[in-house]
Amino acid sequence: MAITQELTTISSVAALLVQTLHSLGHDPAPLLKKAGIDEQDVGNPATRIPTVRMQVLWRLALDVTGDPALGLVAARQFQPAVLHGLGFACLASDTLHDVLGRLVRYSRMLNELPDFTLQESAATTDLVVQLPGLGPDFVHAAMDMGMAAFLRLCQITAGRDLLPVHTCLQRPTPVNTTAYENMFGPSIDYETDSNRLCFDKSTALAPLSTSHPELARLNDQTVIDYLARYDRSNITMQVRSRIIEQLPEGRPSQGDIATRLNTSLRSLQRKLREQDTSYKELLSDTQRELALIYIRDSNRSIGEITYLLGFSEPSNFTRAFKRWTGQSPAGYRESH
């Protein structure tokens, strides 16, 4: 995916870089002006900044500071409030696995360029962030800050001493790797096909003392509402957001979703056909994606997952899960 003017970044990312420049004794105002970024937009939760302009700002910031590890410097100032409701939902998560799942689920709130996935192996739970089709002019300091900030978020929720068992970075190998080892630990691969933070699976599934399910749910809702407003021209994303919102109250009908979107059932069906999808397909895909996240958390019972996904009975969930994966929920959990 090329970096186009349409791709945007949450404005608080710019605020974090501006804060870092101030702390280093540099005036960010002329850099913002050169990058075409209005100072009033920086940190304003109601605005987003084109990713191409953020790349210009990063390039200018690297020039003025002379520090190729500037992204890591900026990440050390990261606090969950930078991510607004998503950050607070992560703080209230049940497990580190839930934190990573939320980053994946709501990644478009942060930046539309990377592809976020959660991958599992026998020993690790991995947050994978892939930047497709990067050109030679891409400023890797931006992704440095992103991956380091995600790690900082995990440390704030799961313990300051937390480190990945292994890290992969898509960036070229830096001349001086010390700053990266100080941030991510000694086990790092560079020039990989994706960015990856690999956490010990038992650590990822351990209950967090700061867990607060109701607070997490409320902040999830603020993120869902934000994305619904942002994606109001994208009916597929609107429907997915409303499905996620409604599932714990029972499996929503297409008519329910149409009502919540203030449109007619016929209009919703037509718009979905125009995007080569259907409500049935979106509902099943959303339930499947959430099921694969929830089932890997051994602290969640099958009954709880059944409720969260809008099924009336565990047997109904089990049949659907077998259709999606070819395995029972218990069998899948045991093998993953």
Image (cartoon, rainbow, N blue to C red):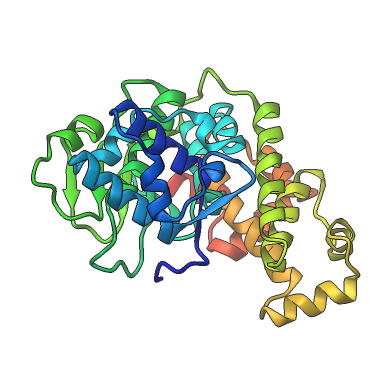
Image spot of residue 52 (x, y percent): 41, 61
Q: Nearer the viewer, residue 177 or 324?
A: 177
Residue at the top extreme of this rendering: 209
Who's the residue at 70% across and 43% down the image? 308
**Residue 166 x %, y %:** 24, 41
In this rendering, is residue 267 above or below 192? below
59 or 80: nearer the eye? 59
The answer to whether 108 appears left or right of 120 in the picture is right
Q: How many marks?
A: 0
Q: Nearer the viewer, residue 294 or 314?
A: 294
**Residue plotted at (67% across, 59% down):** 319
86 over 260 or under it: above or below: above
Q: Name the spot of residue 82 as percent of width and height, x first.
A: 51, 34
Residue sitting nearer the eye, 225 or 257:
225
Give residue 218's quadrant in the image: top right
Residue 94: image quadrant is top right
Q: Is residue 208 visible?
A: yes
Residue 123 visible in the snapshot: no
- Say which quadrant the N terminus sits in: bottom left
x, y percent for residue 33 = 42, 50
Residue plotted at (17% across, 34% down): 179
Which residue is pictured at 25% across the width and 55% down the height? Answer: 170
- Position of 310 compared to 72: left or right? right
Q: Is residue 37 left or right of residue 242?
A: left
